[in-house]
Amino acid sequence: MSDYRPPVKDLKYALEHFGRLEELTAHERYGHVDPETLEAVIDEHSRFMAEVWAPTDRDGDTEGLTWTPEGVTTPESFKPAWDKFVEGGWQGFNLEPEYGGMGFPASVFSVGSEVSSGSNAAFAMLPGLTTGACELLEAWGTEEQKEVYLTKMVRGQWSGTMNLTEPHAGSDVGLSSTKAVPVGDGSFRITGTKIFISFGDNDLVKNIVHLVLARTPDAPPGTKGISLFLVPKFLPDADGNPAEPNDVSCVSIEEKMGIHSSPTCVMSFGDDDGAIGWLIGEENQGMRAMFTMMNAARLAVAVQATGIADAGYQKAVDYASERTQGSEIGGDTPGPVPIVVHPDVRRMLLEMKSSIEAMRNLSVHTASCLDLSKVSEGEESDRHRESVELLTPVAKSWCSDTGLRVNSLAVQVYGGMGYIEESGVSQHFRDQRITAIYEGTNGIQAMDLVGRKIGLRMGGAFADLMAEMRGVLVELGKVEELSDTERELEAALDRLQDTTDWIMENGLADPRDALAGATPYLEMFGLTAGGWTMARQAVAAVDQLDEEGADTAYLQAKVTTARFFCEQLLPKVHSLAAAVTAGHQILFDIDVEALPSV
């Protein structure tokens, strides 16, 4: 049994106040998500993850993976856990009932995915990627592709991957050189090499469905010439069962800093005659289709970062409560005392706890915008969709950076023991580090934010979000205890508005000025959005304190963490503003030749 404990009460609280379930369940699509069903599903999923998946986490980190020319072998404990996962139907958590899924909203799936990542972040990538591949096929696949592949993927019998980058291309997918030559019968022969393919091979499922970006003959250069293809590891027979091996192979796996049990594969397509694949969507429109999976993956990274952060935080709280050292400062308790009583340890724990709550709130809110965009119509649907576009790079980057900070603090709480692998806390730090890199590095997300997202609808999407965020100030003003929270949030919103105006004005004159400050701007945005959600949390908790039978201690803690975040962490936005508005010139005042230290 692992020491990870799914934060079930906090998950339900976040859903209650940020999932907007009352709005969602008024629509037929989510009408089955009644409170009793929702509570039962969250409880059972959390129990399953704690009892079945979490015990595999340490195995995955220490035992790792084995590669041979025949494929990848996962740790011994994984197969039984995966089979139970499939048996429980958990792969279809948020997928369409038409194909065997449960059809829960993305906001509910978000809290479920957090628990999966907290239990075993590396293992959770397998169902996470498969979910993204299913959503892509739901949106872009042909009826035949859905019939043959989708149902098996939704049930967890087959898995899915995302094959984008190549050795020479890195994040510039437009440089992709993988080829797709039409055969004449509707299929294509795929040849090329893809790298950094998570779960590109595994021994847990009967077939793997690769979604591969490639170029057809005479395709235009850059991303405009990219098409998307479905390339299975095994070609299905007439009955849809895996049969003849396709010309696809995992030629190696990477030795990584963390997520040791997630195989990061180098995939080779077409070493012999060419791998057989089928076009998804329209030719030369592959990036449009792939963004369905990429954007889902970016929001999933925010959730993953939250889960890993909470796993590290739980260890830190337990250790601080048990480890005795020193005397109580300002108290009468003789030493040694549990280190949790020391002010600096308490500061670290409260920063961790409040940050995790803000990360969770922001992720669930963003997911609820995605849900509402699906059930709304016209301008309302467009408004929710724009919110998703605007907040996705913020959630992905700010949550992953903040998650790394949380797990760094977890190591710090342990002191020297945190640096020892035996403690287990260092694994979460190592696992967390990748979240700021994959699915588009955080620098790329920041460039996307300032280059495209704040300009959506000529800045209208940003203006709408700012108006929504300022709306909570009125509620804060009604509670004397939250006056400092109101002051700091209003100041942060003003600062974010000012720096956004600067970027919009100066970025037009010289894009280098906007890009030079993009990363600190995204951090400002994330802190402010996180502060907004925490202010909403505080208002909701204060209101609930007056209800009969209220859980006073729990709700008061919600107020305290919200106040700590807004009053002690949120003011950092002001120090970031100088970096946002500094312009690009100082970055280039030093010659490249002067950068080396020797």
Image (cartoon, rainbow, N blue to C red):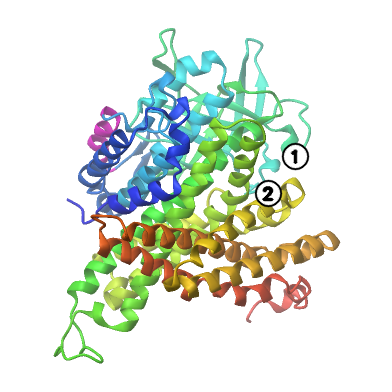
Dot 1: element: helix
**The label number, if any, that marks residue 222 in the structure image:** 1
Measuring from the top left, give residue 473's x and y in whole percent. Answer: 55, 64
Q: CA distance from mark 2 to mark 1?
A: 29 Å
Prevailing secondary structure of the magenta residues: helix
Q: Earlier in the sequence, mark 2 or mark 1?
A: 1
Q: Pick out the residue farthest to the right.
A: 509
The structure residue drawn at horizontal position 33% and vertical position 71%, both measured from the top left corner, is: 349
The structure residue drawn at horizontal position 23% and vertical position 55%, both measured from the top left corner, is: 549
Dot 2: element: helix
The answer to whether residue 94 of the structure is visible from this angle is yes
Work out whether residue 187 or residue 413 is closer to the camera in this orientation and state it: 413
Work out whether residue 238 or residue 309 is closer to the camera in this orientation and state it: 309
**The label number, if any, that marks residue 461 in the structure image:** 2
What amino acid type should be assigned to the residue bearing mark 1?
Gly
Residue 150 position (above or below residue 74):
above
Measuring from the top left, give residue 99's x and y in whole percent. Answer: 42, 20
Residue 380 is one of the magenta-drawn residues: no
Measuring from the top left, give residue 595's x and y in whole percent. Answer: 68, 76
- Give the label, 2 or 1, closer to the camera: 2
The structure residue drawn at horizontal position 37% and vertical position 56%, both measured from the top left corner, is: 308
